[in-house]
Image: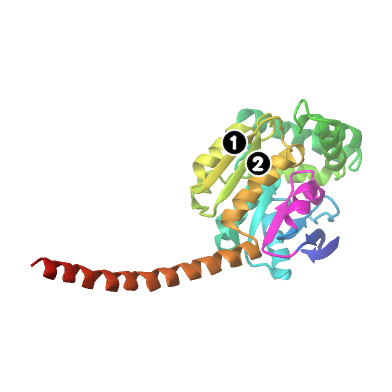
Amino acid sequence: MAVAKIDGTSIAYEVTGEGPPLVFLHCWTGSKRFYFNQVEKFSRDYRCVCVDFPGHGESGELEGTDYSVERFGEMTRTLLARLGIKRAVFVGHSLGGMVCFYLGIHYPDSVAGLVLLDTTSHLSGFFFQRLGALAAVALGAVGAALWNTGFKLTKAVVAGTAATHPLAGPDPRLLSARECSRGSNRAMTLTLNKARNFNATPRLGEISAPSLIVVGNADLLADVRHANRMAAGLPNSTLLVVRGAGHMTLFEKPEIVNDAMADFLARAWPPAKAAKKAAKKAARKPAKKTAKKPAKKAARKPAKKSTKKAAA
């Protein structure tokens, strides 16, 4: 793990592998650890950068109350600039997907593509999620006032049940419960309060980068309606609904998510080796065609003329 000081806050991140950069942004209450399945696969061909947002994972908390999507996006850009990364495919889960939208709208030249996992362009766009987010903010504020670092068991139970498919095995539930109960109540409440009012829906049409949208069919927190709305708004998007998954498709159904990502990346952001092969192949084709065509025409024309003359 590495740490960068940004806006006076320690931001934890990990860089694995070499190649075109992939930037992984996690969900609310989550951490960079959530992407272990994806990093294991894609670090063979890509430079995988996993970031902990402020107040999450191993990053420090911010001074003040601005835990907004916009600020997370700007801090992510600062980190990438220090790493020398000018352009990347961004993979965003839930809250991380909102940060992806912010970057795609405001910094299109730095976005080669978006992988949007169980996310939404407007959390409060539908009544159930609007009510749920408001209730969570209210309870979180009470929890922060009473015991800022406490109620871990309560948070673990909620995360382990609400975020995963009803028939999910113990591993996804335990991972969700462990990671999503780590943060302080203050940081989590401030983050959700900002996120619930973030709305990128009216500006989705401005994002020209190719996008892959993945959603679990049993996702309660950013359900299929959110995915359909994003697919309708993004001009260059593909939608995949994963059966048997909830809000944590990235580790509930990692094989399906990884295969979809691999197919998407092969088209939108191919590995360095594949890109070189494609470039060589493209460079060879015109040379072959231009060499063959003149030879054929030169051989055919005299033959036709001589046939006509013989017949006359």
Q: Residue furthest top?
A: 166
Q: Answer left or right for 240 relative to 236.
A: right
Q: Which residue is mark 2?
A: 119
Separation (CA) of disc 2 from disc 1: 8 Å
* x, y percent for residue 114: 61, 52
Magenta residues, start to end? 18-43
Q: What is the basis of the colouring in this image? A: rainbow
Say which residue appears at 50% left-offset and 52% top-offset: 206
Q: Quadrant of the N terminus?
A: bottom right
Q: Residue furthest left?
A: 312
The reply to whether discs 2 and 1 touch (Cβ–Cβ < 8 Å) is: yes
Which quarter of the picture shows residue 255? top right
Q: Nearer the viewer, residue 123 or 15?
A: 15
Disc 2: CA contacts within 10 A as few (<14), some (14-19) or many (>=20): many
Disc 1 residue type?
Answer: His
Q: Answer left or right for 26 relative to 286.
A: right
Height in image: 77 above or below 132?
below
Can residue 237 be spotted in the picture? Answer: yes
Disc 2 residue type?
Answer: Thr
Height in image: 76 above or below 141?
below
Say which residue appears at 62% left-offset and 35% top-offset: 241
Assess whether residue 25 is covered by the magenta stretch.
yes
Say which residue appears at 58% left-offset and 32% top-offset: 225
Q: Which residue is mark 1?
A: 226
- Disc 1 element: helix
Q: Answer left or right for 72 relative to 233.
A: right
Assess whether residue 210 is covered by the magenta stretch.
no
